[in-house]
């Protein structure tokens, strides 16, 4: 199960992901990614990411870049961070230790 809380900060949308990001829950993330601006994914409550979940993050990255925006990840759980590192995602997307860093970079 995945819940997504949306927070707005002027031209920035922060999405707080809670639960598991996988093939069943990934489409719910795809639906809420805005078309423009800065998007920050707060992964502090994300406990699991599958390969399909990685694909959803990649789709979010492509969508924001094609619209002239950008995607940032913050507050990543150690197990999820390890997966992002092993899969090469850390070279594709900017990561920050906390929300403030992601919002103010």
Image (cartoon, rainbow, N blue to C red):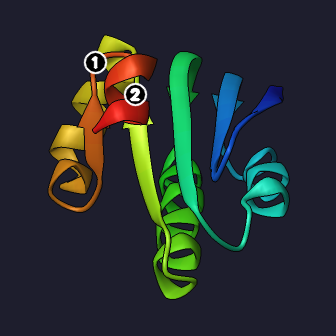
User: In this view of the protein, which residue sits in the foreground, 11 or 13?
Assistant: 11
Q: Which residue is mark 1?
A: 97
Q: Nearer the viewer, residue 99 or 76?
A: 99
Residue 38 shows which numbered tag?
none
Residue 75 visible? The answer is no
2 or 1: tag closer to the N-terminus: 2
Query: According to the image, label 2 marks what residue?
Result: 74
10 over 76 or under it: above or below: below
Could you say where residue 104 lies in the image, as x and y percent from the top left?
35, 32
Whether residue 59 is visible, yes or no, is yes
Residue lying furthest bottom in this view?
Answer: 66
* Residue 74 picture quarter: top left
Number of numbered markers: 2
Residue lying at 24% horizontally and 52% vertically, measured from the top left: 87
User: Is residue 47 toward the left or the right of residue 13 in the image?
Assistant: left
Residue 49 in the image: state x and y as whole percent.
52, 36
**For the point 34% across and 18% down, which residue is it?**
79
């Amino acid at each position: 199960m995945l819940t997504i809380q949306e927070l707005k900060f002027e031209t920035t949308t922060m999405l707080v992901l809670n639960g598991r990001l996988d093939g069943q829950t990934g489409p719910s993330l795809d639906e809420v990614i805005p078309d423009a601006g800065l998007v920050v994914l707060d992964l502090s409550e994300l406990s699991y990411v599958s390969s399909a979940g990685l694909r959803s993050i990649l789709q979010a990255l492509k969508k924001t870049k094609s619209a002239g925006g950008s995607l940032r990840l913050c507050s990543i759980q150690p197990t999820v961070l390890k997966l992002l590192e092993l899969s090469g995602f850390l070279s594709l997307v900017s990561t920050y230790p906390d929300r403030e860093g992601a919002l103010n970079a």
